[in-house]
Amino acid sequence: MRLDAAAYAAMFDLPCPLFWFPCWHTTEQRQSGPDGSFYWLPHREALAGLSAGLANYFAYLFDKSANPKWLRAMTTMPPEPLWQTILSGKRGMWSTASQFAAAALVVTKDGEIAPARDADDAAVFRRVPVQVSCADDGRTTWTRSEQETGRWMLSITDAARYPAAMTRAVSELFHALR
């Protein structure tokens, strides 16, 4: 998937509030940083111990199975060799924080999911007001703002703890599904 630069630039000109969760701290570098939503999600940490149905859902998805009987497969654990291969992998994750923020939630530095209004300095990410513009080629220029601007950007409060905190929170969500 590639960026549609014109559509991306037009988004910054809309007259409505904009909550921006950039993918990258540094463009195209798959590393966590203070101004990007990217992190690596180790499958074993997020998926081990899932219910049989959910484990098989992920196995079906990651294995790109062509088996048309996908629903029947959800009643048992996936084949052990396949499941171990999946658990040994990792996924690049972007914008997970935006899903929590849309639900008025944050993730704490310890990986707990909490109401945004109660988290304060414990949150591993927040949204900060910014002045931002985007050129037609999709390149953004931004600065933090002390005043409300109608534009908010993701800000990672602890880049070193962000990947583990987000992984723990995602794992908690997956394990809540039955």
Image (cartoon, grey):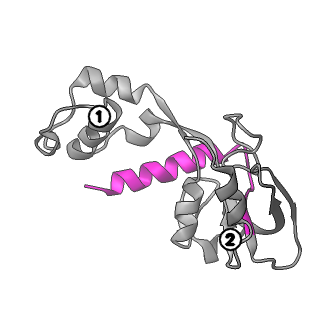
Q: Position of 117 compared to 79: left or right?
A: right
Q: Is residue 170 above or below residue 130?
A: above
* Number of marks in picture: 2
Residue 87: percent from left, percent from top: 39, 29
For the N terminus, which image quadrant? Answer: top right
Q: Which stretch is magenta? A: 152-178
Residue at 29% across, 34% down = 59
Q: Position of 95 compared to 124: left or right?
A: left
Q: Quadrant of residue 154?
A: bottom right
The front one of 88 and 73 is 73
Q: Which mark is residue 79?
A: none
Q: Is residue 65 above or below residue 49?
A: above
Q: Position of 27 compared to 115: left or right?
A: right
The residue at which mark 2 appears reads as: 18
Residue 89: percent from left, percent from top: 45, 27
Look at the numbered disc 1 and give the secondary structure of its residue.
helix
- Tell whether position 25 is magenta: no
What amino acid type should be assigned to the residue bearing mark 2? Leu
Residue at 32% across, 38% down = 61
Q: Position of 44 compared to 107: left or right?
A: left
Q: Quadrant of residue 173?
A: bottom left
Residue at 61% across, 72% down = 116
Residue 124 visible:
no
The front one of 46 and 90 is 90
- Tell whether position 158 is magenta: yes
For the C terminus, which image quadrant? Answer: bottom left
Residue 169: percent from left, percent from top: 50, 53
The front one of 113 and 104 is 104
Q: Is residue 104 above or below residue 153?
A: below
Q: Quadrant of residue 38?
A: top right
The residue at which mark 1 appears reads as: 59
